[in-house]
């Protein structure tokens, strides 16, 4: 009887057989994904099956950096890797090194290479992209003349602004020669007076949308002097034309929303601007009127007319004060004169004469105030209150000074 081997030994032996088989160390397997699970460790476990068989697969987290889409059940993919035995369970499985979607794997690689090359050239730089006109009046559309795309754009445009004019360049948007017709449409509208150009088509497979990944088309879009909106496929579809265009729209309907301004909203906004402008002007006028009134008051104080008026008022006031001062001075002077007159009245010879006294003077008019100045036979003039009398001295009574 031959010597028995352990389970581990047999599994290891089989695993070595797999490793020695060059075909199994680098193989591509096509199938449909089933039972896909993303493990918290970063590994992906799934089953690859076709109509007659299935094989267990695993992609370790270290290999996932090359996977640029999410694995989901039902996807048809091509897995590149190696087949080996998982010794613990004694079953073989496919260890995935890279995964691409079946049917688009080659196209996807071409797409990525072109995108990286054009990106490195700066063809997709934001600095070179043109601004989409806010108030476009004419829009050129490059798409198929039949189908939902042109109808959707027309419906959205009519709803938003019925005054915008749409021009269609019927282009082939799928299959051989499609990219060339789109280029012709762009070049045609570039020579017209349209404000914006929309290029695109509805959804479809990668192959259906492939003409919008054409390098020549991307360069024509980038070099176009008119702003271009690219609306190819659905929101999840992104083509080279989307990167080269000045603006990408997720759908053709969205492209019309971006290109056509809403007339009703514009009217409402215009009314609001008109109201705000009127309010601003009225506020400015109110402020300016107040300033004008202030300046008019200030000007009145410095104007020649006002200065003359102020001088006249000042002179009138001075005249009034001078008049009062003169009247007061005159009154005071009159009062003093009256006092002086009363005082003089008591000293006046005439007043004495009224009391019965006389004024005696010699013939020369000199006052005789003493008998010592009299001589016998001397003629004297006696002045009374009511007249004069000439007398002669007959006798002198009294003693003369020195006599």
Image (cartoon, rainbow, N blue to C red):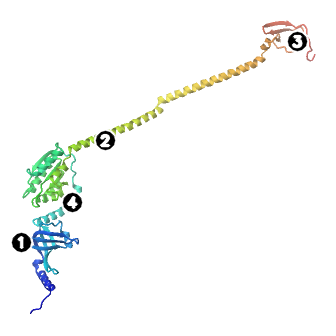
Task: State yes or no: discs 4 and 3 in contact (Cβ < 8 Å).
Answer: no
238 versus 312 height, above or below: below
Q: Which residue is mark 2?
A: 276
Q: Which residue is mark 4?
A: 122
Q: Nearer the viewer, mark 4 or mark 2?
A: 2
| Quarter of the rendering containing residue 92 | bottom left
What's the CA distance linking mark 2 and mark 1? 74 Å
User: Is tag 3's residue or tag 2's residue first in the polypeptide sequence?
Assistant: 2
Camera-side residue: 297 or 204?
A: 204
Q: Quadrant of the N terminus?
A: bottom left
What's the CA distance linking mark 3 and mark 2? 122 Å
Q: Which residue is mark 1?
A: 52
**Circle 4: is it few (<14), some (14-19), or many (20+) Cα within 10 Å?**
few
User: Is tag 1's residue or tag 3's residue first in the polypeptide sequence?
Assistant: 1
Could you say whether the residue bearing mark 4 is in a helix, strand or loop?
A: loop
Q: Nearer the viewer, mark 2 or mark 1?
A: 1
Place of residue 110 in the rendered image (x, y in percent of width and height, measured from the top left) = 13, 65
Place of residue 189 in the rendered image (x, y in percent of width and height, measured from the top left) = 13, 49
187 versus 264 height, above or below: below
Q: Which residue is mark 3?
A: 374
């Amino acid at each position: 009887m031959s010597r028995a081997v352990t389970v581990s030994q047999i599994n290891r032996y089989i695993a070595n057989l797999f490793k020695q088989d060059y075909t199994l160390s680098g193989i591509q397997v096509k199938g449909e994904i089933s039972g896909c699970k993303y493990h918290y460790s970063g590994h992906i476990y799934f089953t690859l099956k076709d109509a007659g068989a299935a094989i267990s697969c695993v992609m370790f987290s270290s290999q996932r950096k090359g996977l640029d889409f999410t694995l989901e059940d039902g996807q048809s993919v091509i897995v590149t890797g190696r087949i080996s035995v998982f010794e613990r369970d004694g079953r073989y499985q496919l260890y995935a090194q890279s995964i691409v979607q079946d049917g688009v794997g080659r196209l996807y690689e071409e797409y990525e290479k072109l995108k990286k090359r054009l990106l490195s050239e700066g063809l997709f730089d934001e600095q070179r992209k043109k601004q989409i006109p806010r108030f476009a009046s004419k829009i050129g559309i490059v798409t198929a003349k039949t189908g939902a795309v042109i109808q959707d754009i027309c419906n959205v445009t009519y709803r938003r602004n019925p005054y915008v004019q749409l021009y269609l360049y019927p282009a082939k948007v799928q299959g051989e020669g499609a990219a060339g017709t789109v280029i012709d449409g762009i070049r045609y509208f570039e020579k017209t007076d349209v404000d914006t150009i929309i290029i695109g088509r509805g959804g479809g497979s990668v192959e259906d949308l492939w003409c919008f990944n054409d390098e020549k088309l991307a360069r024509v879009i980038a070099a176009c002097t008119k702003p271009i909106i690219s609306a190819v496929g659905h929101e999840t579809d992104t083509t080279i034309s989307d990167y080269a265009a000045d603006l990408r729209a997720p759908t053709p309907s969205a492209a019309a929303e971006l290109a056509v301004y809403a007339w009703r909203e514009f009217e409402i906004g215009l009314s609001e601007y008109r109201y705000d402008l009127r309010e601003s002007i009225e506020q400015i006028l109110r402020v300016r009127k107040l300033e004008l009134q202030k300046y008019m008051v200030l000007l009145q104080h410095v104007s020649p007319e006002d200065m003359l008026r102020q001088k006249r008022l000042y002179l009138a006031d001075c005249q009034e004060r001078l008049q009062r001062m003169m009247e007061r001075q005159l009154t005071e002077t009159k009062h003093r004169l009256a006092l002086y007159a009363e005082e003089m009245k008591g000293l006046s010879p005439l007043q004495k004469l009224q009391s019965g006294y006389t004024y005696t003077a010699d013939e020369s008019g000199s006052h005789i105030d003493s008998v010592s100045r009299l001589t016998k036979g001397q003629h004297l003039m006696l002045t009374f209150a009511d007249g004069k009398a000439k007398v002669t001295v007959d006798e002198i009574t009294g003693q003369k000074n020195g006599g």
